[in-house]
Each structure stands twice: as structure tokens, then as C-alpha cells.
Image: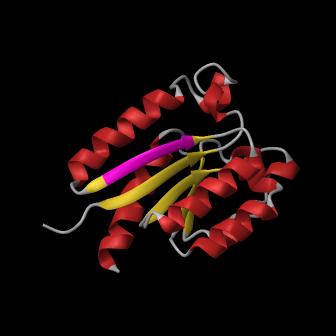
Amino acid sequence: MPASLKILVVNGPNLNLLGTREPHIYGTLTLDDINGRLRDLAGQLGNVELEFFQSNHEGAIADRLHEGRAQGLAGCIINPGALSHTSYTLHDAMEAVGYPFVEVHISNIHRREAWRQHSVVSSAAAGSIVGLGWRGYELALRALVAMLRDA
């Protein structure tokens, strides 16, 4: 049986408030609910090991991405939250670590405020999924696992 794919799921600032923060935009599921659904899906996909990380601090996220390099991560799903629009630090960390990323946004950033419509981290990601709610995380996991297994 092939080795397990180790995948990190990173959520940035304010995503710890999912379920109560602007539910008309972000839905009513909590981050724990979403993580549970991802765990279930990982079990269905077989040989997928997930680790979850959430921080409201840019540097902590960059540090965690760096640690993943030494830990042999296969890939990462990342929702950087508002850092998507401002963080060249995260962009550069994503470029530097050598494993693929799928960027996720619960809301459709292209239909929101002008400052949210561009993500500076997107160019460091293999792909982006936006506007599909919590289901974007599941789609990201399926896509990332398929890309890794095809490689």
C-alpha cells in the first residue's frame, strides 16, 4: 500500500469565528464542522492524513508552512482569509516550500469589495476555489489528492 499523503489544511485570520461571523456570507458551519467533514472525506479517499492549523497571525502561518517542508508534507489547502489580499509573506512562503497548494475562499471574492477581488497568494497556488462555501474545502481536497496521485 502506498504511503499516506500528508496534507495540511491552513485557515487564516478570523476563520476561527466561522459559524457566527457573518453567516449570510460565510455560512453556519464552524471551522470544526468543516474539519470534521474533511476528515470524513480523507477517510473515503484512503491513505490521506490531514493536519489542521488556524492562526490569526501572519508569521505563525508562514512558520507553519516552513515546518511542513521539513515534515515532508505532500500538499496544502489554504484559506488565508484577508491575508490573501495583502500578504506577500505568505505568497513567498508558499513559493519557497516546494509542495503544492490549493487556495480556498468560502465567499466569491470576485463579487465582493474591490480590495478583496485580487489575491496576491493565488499565483503561488496550483489552483483556487472561490465562492462555493464550505464545499470548496472538499473540492480542494479531492483536487489536491488527485494531482498528487497523478504526479
At horizontal 72% and vertical 66% (from top left) the residue drawn is 91
Q: What quarter of the picture does the N terminus occupy?
A: bottom left
Residue at the limit of the structure toward the top, as seen here: 20
At horizontal 58% and vertical 53% (from top left) the residue drawn is 78
* Labels in figure, total: 0
> Considering depth in this image, is 47 or 60 the residue closer to the camera?
60
Specify start and end residues of the magenta stretch as a single range: 49-53
Instruction: Say if 81 sits above or below 145 in the image.
Output: above
Q: In this view, does 138 lie to the left or right of 84?
A: left
Q: Residue 25's x, y, as percent?
A: 66, 31
Q: Residue 10's x, y, as percent?
A: 56, 48
Q: Quadrant of residue 20?
A: top right
Query: Is most of the magenta stretch helix, strand or loop?
Result: strand
> Considering depth in this image, is 25 or 36 the residue closer to the camera?
36
At horizontal 52% and vertical 25% (from top left) the residue drawn is 30
State yes or no: residue 52 in magenta.
Answer: yes
Q: In this view, does 5 lie to the left or right of 35?
A: left
> Considering depth in this image, is 54 or 119 the residue closer to the camera?
54
Residue at the limit of the structure toward the right, as seen here: 115
Q: Residue 33's x, y, as percent?
A: 44, 28
At horizontal 60% and vertical 42% (from top left) the residue drawn is 106
